[in-house]
Image (cartoon, rainbow, N blue to C red):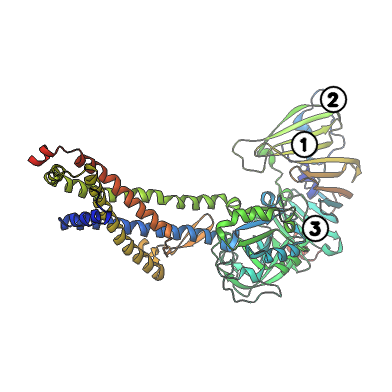
Amino acid sequence: MRASLPTTWRIAWRNLWRNPRRTTLALAAIGLSVTLVLLYDGILRWEADYIVDTITGPMLGHVQAHAPEWRRTRAMDKTIAGVSRAIDALRRDPDVAGVDARVYAPALAASGEEGFAVMVVGVDMAEATRPSRLLEGLQTPLGGRRVLMGRLLAEQMGVKQGAEVAIVGQGIDGSLANDLFTVAALIDTSVDFVNRQAIVMPLGDARELFAMGDEVHELVIYARDPARAGPLAARLAGAPELAGAEVVDWKTAAPGLNDLVELVSVMWVFVLVLVFVAAAAGVANTALMSTFERTHEFGMLLALGTAPSRIVGMIVVESLALGATGALLGTALGGAVVGWLYYAGFDYAKFTGGGPTSLSAFGVTFTMIIRPRLASIDIVRVVMAVMATAVLASAWPALRAARLQPARALRE
Amino acid sequence: MPIRPVCAAAIVALATVAAPFSPAAPVPQHPSPPDVDAVLARLDDLYRSKSSIARMEIIVTSPRSTRTMRLKAWSRGEDEALIVIEAPPREEGTSTLRVGSNLWNFLPRIARTIRVPPSMMLGSWMGTDFTNDDLVKESSMHKDFTSRIDRRSDTPPGWWISLAVKPGVVGRWARIDILLDDANLPVEERHFDRKGRLARVMTFDETKMLGGRRLPAHMTLTPVDTPGQRTEMRYLELQFDVAIPNDTFSLSRLERGK
């Protein structure tokens, strides 16, 4: 005789609730561990996305192009020439979301007699003021020799908004570059080097100051799909508009930052191990206890001619039902918590006892407000892990029940 | 005894040491190795005096362009110097004042005087391959380096002298090799960085009489890691031990330009 599957499930479900307290406890253990795992996954996913955005948005971009030797020497005269045509072509590229064109020139800045080493950064203002870019939301109009200064640099120089500063450097032809500028605003960006060292000005002003033509030191390209920065870099490296330039994705440009992202992205593995242990403990305990107590019952069933495989099936199905129910409850609860935190934001800084509200690492400032998020793969992974654990944890009790000698089992 | 790389002495055109240059300085017999201290003392004084006024031409060649500057330089003692650019017109009047280890640039176009901060000392001086540091290098390098005769050179006939930095000294160069010909005039100077790599080479030629001394009038500084890049410096006029007004090495004089 072959029982239909729904029958087995019905019996298994009924068996589970023969000991409501034990089953409830097992469900709570599984459910809570799934909830915590989803919350942790959510934070990790947010962190990975956030780190990538924070790293690439303001400064690095997803893909960068330079003259071949610029990354090594940072020499003023290593530029990409004829760049406006390249920018136009890139902006028409369907995979490109934006292009910033930059000039980097070391210079001496002074408001009085004392000179300070600075880096003049010329940027495409239209691109750099877009959301999540270096000058996100900047309202101050520039042009007419009005510039932005990193706040820490300004403090060091004793310069206030509206002050006049002299900038002295070397033109691209080796000539002396010097002019007076007005500090239109002090800026706080997420990029340390900009806050500490930079004077930011529109690309045109920087080119004029340093006697540059239609050329830049760096093209920063934002991909429509950040995850595909690598393939985009590979394709653009062969594109005619960037012929002769070195094109790299941000992972190559900033290997240290990439390592940080990679580290975060493998941490879910440890978390999965956690679920296995918690779920296995809950399921295995329940399955073991319930099979031991039912030795007599299994002996009876076997004596009545029930196939041992059916008993194995029933015990496995009981475990699966327990695991699935726990996973379902956990997913619902975990999803709700993650969803709520996503909208409300979780200020980690509150837990540092009035400590810093942001964290600086690798030259980039990160905020400490956590907004966890989940992808369907996170949920699938956890549910699969719980189910696999349920099957494994029930294997031994199930096989033990199947091997029972009916006569001996009946005497227990 | 004071030792310093010739190029530093040459670019500032100069300071002086207590013992004035003597044309009758004994020239050691060759090929037996010269007395290294005597040779270096003479080398030290080659471009130096109690005071000097020089006019020179600097040609900066890069893969991109060639730029020629003419400048006038005054020096007094070991650590006072004023350099004023006379040409090209775009940079005319731009001046550098050195007093001790301080360096100020005056920029006539924006009428500003700016002191060069320590962090910019390794930056280029006026777009040349010389660094600001080359201009202010102390003449007390004998404290930091030990010297010895290294080996005999055949072409040109002369001696290689090697200066090695003493342990525990912080500085840009680990070793400086100087080739002197048998007239004890510098032919080549090689600078090795802290990792022992050759970083730049300075060559000396066009030996002639300048300010009553026989010395190389033309120097070429070639950074090793940037192909196609070099800075040449040529003395057009050089006077030693001339009277220089007291206020020459002051900020107010700096701002008057030429």
Q: CA distance from mark 2 to mark 3?
A: 48 Å
Helix, strand or loop at disc 3?
Answer: loop
Kindly indicate the quadrant of the structure image that contains residue A308: top left
| Residue A316 position in % (x across, y down) | 26, 48
Kindly indicate the quadrant of the structure image that contains residue A184: bottom right
Q: Are marks 2 and 3 in contact (CB under 8 Å)?
A: no
Q: Which residue is mark 2?
A: B29
Label 2 amino acid?
Gln
Q: Which residue is mark 1?
A: B41
- Picture layout, residue A309 above or below residue A183: above
Q: Which residue is outermost to the right?
A: B209
Tag 2, which chain? Answer: B
Label 1 amino acid?
Ala
Judge depth for marks 3 and 1 and give the one in front.
Answer: 3
Label 3 amino acid?
Asp
Residue ID at (63%, 70%): A148
Q: CA distance from mark 1 to mark 2?
A: 17 Å
Q: Is residue A239 something that shows in the picture?
A: yes
| Residue A318 position in % (x across, y down) | 24, 52
Judge depth for marks 2 and 3 and give the one in front.
Answer: 3
Quadrant occupied by the N terminus of chain B: top right
Res A173 label: 3
